[in-house]
Image: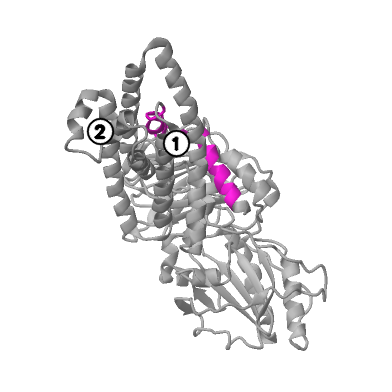
Amino acid sequence: MILFLLAYFGGVLTIVSPCILPVIPFVLARADRPFLRNGLPMLVGMALSFAVVATLASVAGGWVVSANQYGRIAALTLLAVFGVTLLFPRLADRLMRPLVTVGARLSQSADHAAEGSILAPLLLGVATGFLWAPCAGPVLGLILTGAALQGASVKTALLLLIYAAGAATSLALALLVGGRVFAAMKRSIGAGEWIRRGLGAAVLAAVVTIALGLDTGFLTNLSVGSTTALEQGLLDKLHPRDSSAMTGGSLSMMRAKSAGEKPSGENQALPIEGQLPSLDGATEWLNTKPLTADDLKGKVVLIDFWTYSCINCLRAIPHVRAWADKYKDHGMVVIGVHAPEFAFERNVDNVKKALSALKIGYPVAIDNDYKVWRAFDNEYWPAHYFIDAKGRIRHHHFGEGEYDESEKVIQQLLAEAGGKNVPTGMVSVNGSGAEAASDKADVGSPETYIGYDRADHFVSPGGLVRDKSHVYAVGPMQLNDWSLVGDWAVSDERAQLTTAGGSIAYRFHARDLHLVLGPSADGSPIRFVVTVDGNSPGGAHGVDIDAEGRGVVTMQRLYQLVRAPGAVKDHTFEIRFLDPGVQAYAFTFG
């Protein structure tokens, strides 16, 4: 219920978001008509079509994206005709005969028959829903990421519909107020026809804005009217999450699990949280033959959900690896479930290289279809589930930290299973490079995605341009702002450099800075140079560069580029690529 409320209020807040601006002319163009037979059907059509398209796009393949593009073209054409008929009423009379169901008929039918069919405004609303592209705030990111990982469901569709209903509520208020203003102006100055033509011009301007992609480029990056802080405040109050756990977009998924009782000491009774779900959904197994629940009978099992470019996962792995080594001869099995976040993490060869680099020798299930993820009803990377020898889930922990408590759970479950000479004490872990523990008390920069689906705080002039090459320049950067420089093509989850010499700049506050990068599409290595505050990093260099800031992108993975000694403070980071083709995905900090 809380998530449904969040979805509704997130939609309501879109009225103060810049991305709603192109839609407002379509709505206000009918402000002088009866609300129940014109405004309301239009808003219903808009909400329904947005929910349907967004649901399909979040869980289906490229065919939906292509189909939606054709739908947008048809909707733009329809609304352009609608705008022209507002500007030129005589043209509307001529068009009405051959185009009974589109364009002018939609405009004129409500004028002449207020009590007539609601089909015309409903169809206009459907067209508007095809074109509406909300700014990607935390609430919408929560819903869409949950849809992608949890799969298609009635709940996903309802959440998107409720989000759209929230936006429609705000627009309904604007429509009602606009109608009264329109009526008052007609009575006082007789300017009805000129207002009508002005609205027609506004509709055509909105069509041009959307056709040029300005609604999802420039407007998305306007700081005025941003709802991010408001939405995040709602999430923090109504939908709390473990701040050390990373999910897609750094937000909790469709439903936050109760953390249950945590063990406060040795021999503390542990609750039974459920049975070990099937692992049959794994598409492949590494370091072992496929494992089943029968294979694991009598064993204490630790399930670790992870993905190899996730910094939170990388910092937890030294502990998981140490537990696997310490307890493997005492009746415990560790199983890593690799559930990808980015497309390149679906490549099993990439995962194999990561296992080698991370020295992971325990079994790993490849969960590219998220079937194991959904079987556990999981919501986080990393997530640890502790299963006793009877196949029952007895404890779980999300995110980093509380490693001693987790190891006590392992020891208790092994003792319950009748294990003799179970090792005592806690493992001592000293992770290096990206595996080193975060300086959590002084991390002032959030995980930041570079693809347009989840990009935030992007300040290059003109905003992000979707799915085509564009030359960017650095913008004025405050803390946590970032810019692209040079010729880049930005897609939903990454940016790819078109010509050599491009760079990425970021103003950050943290000890460590990491960037998920990949080489060119043909696998060619990409040379780069890093500067911090305009200088070579020197002693602040990360493990993947030298003191002069030089490094090479050789595979798709997380690269540690900065580890600053001494007191943590604000810095300006820049990475310049000497070769074309690099793929950049996300910044993380520690």
Asked if residue 27 is among those painted magenta in the image, a careful observer would answer yes
Query: Which amino acid type corresponds to the residue marked 1 in the rendered image?
Result: Leu
User: Percent position (x, y) of residue 539?
Assistant: 59, 48
Residue 459 higher or lower than 493, as above or below: above
Residue 181 higher or lower than 431, as above or below: above
* Residue at 58%, 62% in the rendered image: 379
User: Percent position (x, y) of residue 420?
Assistant: 77, 89
Q: Nearer the viewer, residue 408 or 326?
A: 408
* Residue at 46%, 25% in the rendered image: 178
Q: Residue furthest front?
A: 115
Q: Is residue 555 visible?
A: no
Region in magenta: 4-31
Asked if residue 262 is among those painted magenta in the image, a careful observer would answer no
Residue where numbered disc 2 is placed: 104
Residue 573 higher or lower than 561, as above or below: above
Q: Residues within 10 Å of mark 2 (few under 14, many from 20)?
A: many
Q: Nearer the viewer, residue 422 or 433?
A: 422
Residue 97 lies left or right of residue 153; in this view the side is: left
Residue 498 lies left or right of residue 442; in this view the side is: left
- Label 1 to label 2: alpha-carbon separation: 21 Å
Query: Which amino acid type corresponds to the residue marked 2 in the rendered image?
Result: Ala
Q: What is the chief secondary structure element of the magenta stretch?
A: helix
> Disc 1 or disc 2, which is closer to the eye?
1
Residue where numbered disc 1 is placed: 36
User: Percent position (x, y) of residue 11?
Assistant: 52, 42
